[in-house]
Amino acid sequence: MTDSARAYFDSFLGMAGEPARRARNLAGKVREDLRTGSEQVREQGSRTASDIGRLIRAEFDANLTRFGVATQADLDDLNLRLEHSEEQIRDLRIRLAEAEARLAAAAAKPTETRQRDAERPAPAETPSSAPAATMEPIDDEEEDA
């Protein structure tokens, strides 16, 4: 009996073999299409959510600006300007300290060095090599008359 059942099963499976294979292939294609479609829907949904978030943020910032409240962009700009000003102050302090050190070194110079500097003759001014020319107007009209 098992042999006959097996024969019937094999013959039945043989008759349904080609359509079953096509059905499995179709099911595999449908599964891939569904998977691809669901990934596309998920990506589109995340893009839409981020677009809505940006839109809400822009509207919120615009309303804050109307009320006179600083936005995050304003705060970031102010922080950059503050950092730049702090760097300038640090540079100026360093230059001031260097100038004070040079002044202290000049004040601590021995008195005889200062006296030698004072006794040294100043460089003579060089007279101009071109003589000063005076130009008198020529009165041609008087000679012609």
Image (tube, grey):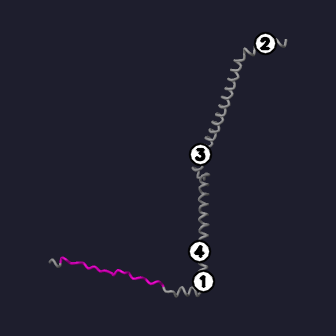
Q: CA distance from mark 3 to mark 4?
A: 50 Å
Question: Would residue 126 be counted in the magenta stretch?
Answer: yes
Q: Quadrant of residue 106?
A: bottom right
**Rendered residue at 60%/52% (across/down):** 73
Mark 1: give few (<14), some (14-19) or many (20+) Cα within 10 Å.
few
In percent of width and height, residue 76 lies at: 61, 54
Give the residues drawn in magenta, as a range. 122-141
Q: CA distance from mark 3 to mark 2?
A: 72 Å
Q: Which mark is residue 109?
A: 1
In percent of width and height, residue 20 lies at: 71, 19
Residue under label 2, please give it: 8
Residue under label 3, please give it: 58
Disc 2 or disc 4, which is closer to the eye? 2
In the rendered structure, which amino acid carries the disc numbered 2? Tyr
In percent of width and height, residue 27 lies at: 69, 24
Along the horizontal axis of the image, is 59 left or right of 125? right
